[in-house]
Structures are given as structure tokens and as C-alpha cells.
Image (cartoon, rainbow, N blue to C red):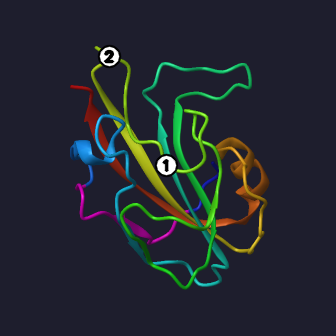
């Protein structure tokens, strides 16, 4: 991703930055997305996106991507400042489990603690992108329009 410094803040009532993600939000639990909220959206924001990526996953693809994508959600209106737990709707892309929408943390057995980066991105355009873009396709198409972003990092270790 390109640099898009901003004052945006991303939080969740489910876990604090750097804290453990409760099992409820993982592949070992209910596999439901956590509630998220944000503040400090830059002036001129026309669209928002939420992504979740595990850079610790031992996966490098032939496309040159790395880690494991858990969530791709985009075309969110700038009028919202939160997502409820288990959010439905909006435009989704596939996670690396091969499913649309959220797929919770589930690192390989014995692989230790992984970090999960939940990102909120503010875009200067409302691109109205079609459903089904991977995280990498979404970023390639929108990177010049990203005017703000921040992350919330949670951790999880498989039981």
C-alpha cells in the first residue's frame, strides 16, 4: 500500500490493539467478524474499505503476494463510522479460504501466535467496484485514491 498518513483511528470492543482476539471471532469459534469503529476520516472521503490480513502466515503465492487474507469489504459509504459484529451487506471479495466475506484467524497447528491487521481505508473516490475483488486486486485498483488509513492489530494462537 502507498503512504496515506491520517489521523484515522480504528478500534474494536472485542480486543485492544496488540491484544488477543477472542476465539469467538476465529475459525475455531463462531467465525464471525468483530465489531469495528473508526474516527478521523479525512475530509473528501467518498468511500471506505475494511481489510484483514495475516502477514505471519507462511504463504507466498505465484502472484507474488504473501500472508493470508481474511477479509475484503469495500464500497462502504463515508457516512458510517462503524460495523456491527457479524456485519452483512456491502461489497465483498474472497478471503484466502476461498469464500466471500470474513474468515477468522486460524493459523497452522503449532505455528505460534500470528498478528492480524484489520485496516480501514479512506478513498477520495467512490469507485463502485464490482464484487469479488481479491485484496490485492482491490489495492491495485484503488491505491491512487487512498487518502487515509490506519490499522488495529490483534493476535491469535491456535489452541
Q: Are marks 1 and 2 in contact (CB under 8 Å)?
A: no
Quarter-of-image position of residue 59: top right
CA separation, marks 1 and 2? Answer: 20 Å
x and y percent of residue 104 in the render? 40, 42
Q: Residue at x 58, y 80 (%)?
A: 78
Q: Which residue is mark 2?
A: 109
Q: Is residue 41 left or right of residue 39?
A: right
Residue 21 visible in the snapshot: no
- From which residue to which does the magenta span run? 5-16
Determine crowd level at label 2: few under 14, some 14-19, many 20+ residues with C-alpha closer than 10 A.
few
x and y percent of residue 53 in the render? 49, 41
Q: Residue 9 colored magenta? A: yes
Determine crowd level at label 1: few under 14, some 14-19, many 20+ residues with C-alpha closer than 10 A.
many
Q: Residue at x 68, y 44 (%)?
A: 134
Compared to residue 122, the image places residue 59 above or below, namely: above
Q: Main secondary structure of the magenta part?
A: loop
x and y percent of residue 7 in the render? 44, 72
x and y percent of residue 52 in the render? 48, 47
Name the disc covering residue 102, or none: 1
Compared to residue 23, the image places residue 34 above or below, namely: below
Which one is earlier in the sequence, the residue at label 1 or at label 2?
A: 1
Amino acid at each position: 500500500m502507498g503512504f496515506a498518513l491520517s489521523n484515522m483511528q480504528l478500534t474494536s470492543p472485542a480486543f485492544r490493539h496488540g491484544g488477543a482476539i477472542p476465539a469467538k471471532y476465529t475459525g475455531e469459534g463462531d467465525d464471525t467478524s468483530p465489531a469495528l469503529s473508526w474516527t478521523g476520516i479525512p475530509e473528501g472521503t467518498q468511500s471506505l474499505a475494511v481489510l484483514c490480513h495475516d502477514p505471519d502466515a507462511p504463504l507466498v503465492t505465484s502472484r507474488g503476494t504473501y500472508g493470508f487474507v481474511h477479509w475484503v469489504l469495500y464500497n462502504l459509504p463515508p457516512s458510517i463510522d462503524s460495523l456491527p459484529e457479524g456485519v452483512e451487506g456491502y461489497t465483498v471479495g474472497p478471503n484466502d479460504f476461498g469464500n466471500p466475506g470474513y474468515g477468522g484467524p486460524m493459523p497452522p497447528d503449532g505455528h505460534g501466535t500470528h498478528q492480524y491487521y484489520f485496516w480501514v481505508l479512506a478513498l477520495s473516490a467512490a469507485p463502485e467496484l464490482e464484487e469479488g475483488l481479491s485484496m490485492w486486486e482491490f489495492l491495485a485498483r484503488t491505491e491512487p485514491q487512498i487518502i487515509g488509513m490506519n490499522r488495529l492489530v490483534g493476535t491469535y494462537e491456535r489452541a
